Amino acid sequence: MSLDLIVTNATLPDGRTGQDIAVTGGRITAIEPGIAAEAAQRIDAGGHLVAPPFVDCHFHMDATLSLGLPRLNQSGTLLEGIALWGELKPMLTHEAVIERALRYCDLAVSQGLLAVRSHVDICDDRLLAVEALLEVKARVKPYLDLQLVAFPQDGYYRSPTAARNLERALDMGVDVVGGIPHFERTMEDGTASVKALCAIAAKRGLMIDLHCDESDDPHSRHIETLAAEAHRLGLGRRAAGSHLTSMHSMDSYYVSKLLPLILEAGIFAIANPLINITLQGRHDTYPKRRGLMRIPEMRALGIPVALGQDCVMDPWYGLGGADMLDVAHMAVHAAPMTSREAIRWAFEAVTSVPAAVMGLEDYGLAKGCHADFVILQAADTIEAVRMRPTRLAVVRRGKVIAQTPARRSTLDLPGRPASLDPASYAPKDAG
């Protein structure tokens, strides 16, 4: 038997070691020790972790890499970021949006990030960003899955043409219904927008992903309406609520009612820890709120929680680098969730869980799945979250599309080793 690619001596996320991965025709054909076959290309994983690609199920690609245009966010608040984006929108050009998005996708691929759900603002009557990102989606399809959300950044009702533009964007081929109910003028309008948007998703048979309650206001409770409407309309796993930061400030008795409602509805929750902990709590003195949804309690109940990146170098966030392990690393600190089990989950929250949010088909490390994976300079998933290691190789449909040399340091210290491999620091019996 002749293979297109074989990866040898791999450690898998489930803990299996010494595994070989056989690839033919862009699919995984076998995963087992000691595969004896000829292959057009062989990669020795050297005992390092081989994982399915990273997935970012909450991002804003139309704004990415625009930091400083037209000015910087001085307050660091969500509202100034929205205002800045409003100033930038009239200045956008088709070519500039495409160029920034393609540059970002290059960076994402280098980090093993091969699937992104991006919200795209539809409140510009030109739908310039929609047209640009639809073109980007087609151009990156060979190496990255890009899913677009029709996002009324200025409010579905607050913006006078948003309702019409959202339908136009969906007709153009945008994949998912979006919304931002907490940015409507009143709580009542926010509630009405959730109901209207859920109805659109149900009628069109689409997924829905709403920015919900990205606020420190404990009375911002639109996730309750989203869960109720998703349950009533049978949207289930086609629905997701993103951010949910007001949950951090809510009365615990109310949360004890809310979380079972979310579970009953069967919807996903998407936390964005990098952004949530920097934008929220800005009006606090001390103590300062972290402004993060109650991830440990939601996980304990069985609510599927994914982690998103949200922003990279844009009006809302001046940092970021397309590294989903930065997101997982921050989550375990901010939640906090530092048990070995919780850190393993954080790795799943930037791989398999967001893949389910996006409905990616044939994703994962199993026979018959797409041969999409990343080789990390780490011993296991916990070490990957701890170190945010080098991506030694990134494979898409059986083809190596990115490689980075292993990180090694040379030392000149009396009586100490001459070189150092950071992956060698993995604890032996930590469990």
Image (cartoon, rainbow, N blue to C red):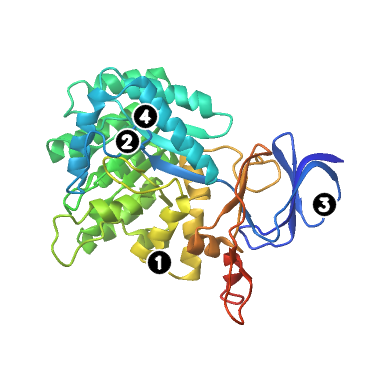
Which quadrant would residue 300 be assigned to in this image?
bottom left
Marks 4 and 3 close (CB-CB < 8 Å): no
The earlier-in-sequence mark between 3 and 2 is 3
Callout count: 4
Residue beneath the point at 51% across and 24% down: 138
Amino acid marked by disc 1: Met
Q: Pointer 2: what residue?
A: 66
Q: Which residue is mark 1?
A: 337
What amino acid is found at the position of numbered circle 2 in the picture?
A: Ser
Query: Label 1 vs label 3: CA separation?
Result: 38 Å
Distance CA(mark 4)–CA(mark 3): 46 Å
Determine the CA span between mark 2 and mark 1: 33 Å
Specify whether residue 114 is in view. no
Mark 1 neighbour class, 10 Å CA radius: few under 14, some 14 to 19, many 20 or more: some
Q: CA distance from mark 3 to mark 2?
A: 47 Å
Mark 1 and mark 2 in contact (Cβ < 8 Å)? no
Please provide percent x and percent y for residue 416.
61, 79
Residue that carries the numbered disc 3 in the rendered image: 35
Q: Amino acid at mark 4?
A: Ala
Whether residue 277 is visible here, answered yes or no, is: yes
Along the polypeptide, which appears first: circle 4 or circle 3? 3
Q: Label 1, label 4: how many angstroms apart (C-alpha)? A: 34 Å
Kindly report which numbered mark, 3 or 2, lies closer to the viewer in this rendering.
2
Quarter where residue 285 is shown: bottom left
Report the mark closest to the observer, 1 or 4.
1
Element at label 4: helix
Q: Which mark is residue 201?
A: 4
User: Which of pointers 4 and 3 indicates the residue nearer the eye?
Assistant: 3
